[in-house]
């Protein structure tokens, strides 16, 4: 049994923390990279999950599993993606980074707003058409909300990754 004085527990915890790369995030030493496949796959999984919930109401748990998986992955995309976050004071964002972040957020919020307005009318319309009970309608509206939250975290990284082009090596 180790004690506090020999620091073996603390050293082990410190090594585990460094292994997760979280100290690099805090220090701002994260290498920004394009992510094209992972956000696209995550968005596809979220869309399939929403479709399962809306079309196959008896298998709603499978759709929710897909939505939760894409939500979990989508929340980590902005940390390593090409969009530098406004809240990170250590990132020296130049004009190009600011423009890329602005455009990615414009596209995201336009898409989320449009899908929210369409979904608010389409989901109850689908419920009337299929004669759903109230519980299924509530489940479908909650799924729409989770899908929109997935879009907020996935789309900026996806847009910026495709808008960036190839990285340019510095001459220095």
Image (cartoon, helix red, strand yellow):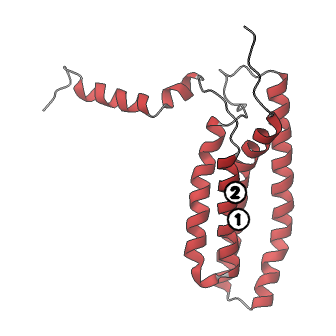
The 10 Å Cα crowd at callout 1, few under 14, some 14 to 19, many 20 or more, is some
Q: Secondary structure at mark 1?
A: helix
Image quadrant in which the N terminus is located: top left
Residue 32 appears in which quarter of the rendering? top right
- Measuring 23% from the left and 25% from the top, which residue is drawn there? 8
Q: Residue pushed farthest top?
A: 172
- Which mark is on residue 168? none
Percent x, y for residue 133? 67, 89
Residue 3 vs 76, above or below: the answer is above
Look at mark 1 in the image and give the residue it sits on.
47
Q: Is residue 26 left or right of residue 8?
A: right
- Which mark is on residue 43? 2
Q: Residue pushed farthest left?
A: 1
Q: Residue pushed farthest bottom?
A: 131
Q: Is residue 9 left or right of residue 27?
A: left
Percent x, y for residue 94? 80, 21
As rendered, which of 166 and 155 lies closer to the eye? 166
- Measuring 59% from the left and 44% from the top, which residue is drawn there? 76
Q: Secondary structure at mark 2?
A: helix
Percent x, y for residue 152? 73, 51
Percent x, y for residue 81? 67, 37
- Measuring 49% from the left and 26% from the top, which residue is drawn there? 23
The 10 Å Cα crowd at callout 2, few under 14, some 14 to 19, many 20 or more, is many
């Amino acid at each position: 049994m180790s004690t506090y004085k020999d620091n073996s527990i603390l050293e082990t915890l410190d090594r585990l923390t460094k292994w997760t790369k979280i100290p690099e995030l805090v220090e701002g030493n994260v290498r920004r990279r394009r992510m094209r496949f992972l956000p696209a796959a995550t968005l596809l999984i979220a869309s399939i999950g929403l479709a399962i919930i809306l079309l196959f109401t008896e298998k709603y748990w499978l759709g929710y599993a897909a939505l939760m998986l894409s939500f979990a992955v989508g929340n980590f995309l902005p940390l390593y993606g090409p969009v530098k976050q406004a809240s990170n004071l250590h990132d020296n964002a130049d004009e190009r980074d600011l423009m890329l972040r602005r455009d990615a957020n414009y596209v995201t919020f336009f898409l989320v707003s449009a899908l929210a307005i369409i979904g608010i009318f389409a989901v109850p319309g689908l419920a009337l058409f299929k004669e759903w009970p109230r519980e299924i309608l509530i489940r479908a509206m909650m799924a729409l909300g989770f899908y929109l939250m997935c879009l907020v975290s996935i789309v900026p990284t996806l847009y910026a990754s495709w808008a960036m082009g190839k990285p340019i090596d510095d001459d220095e």
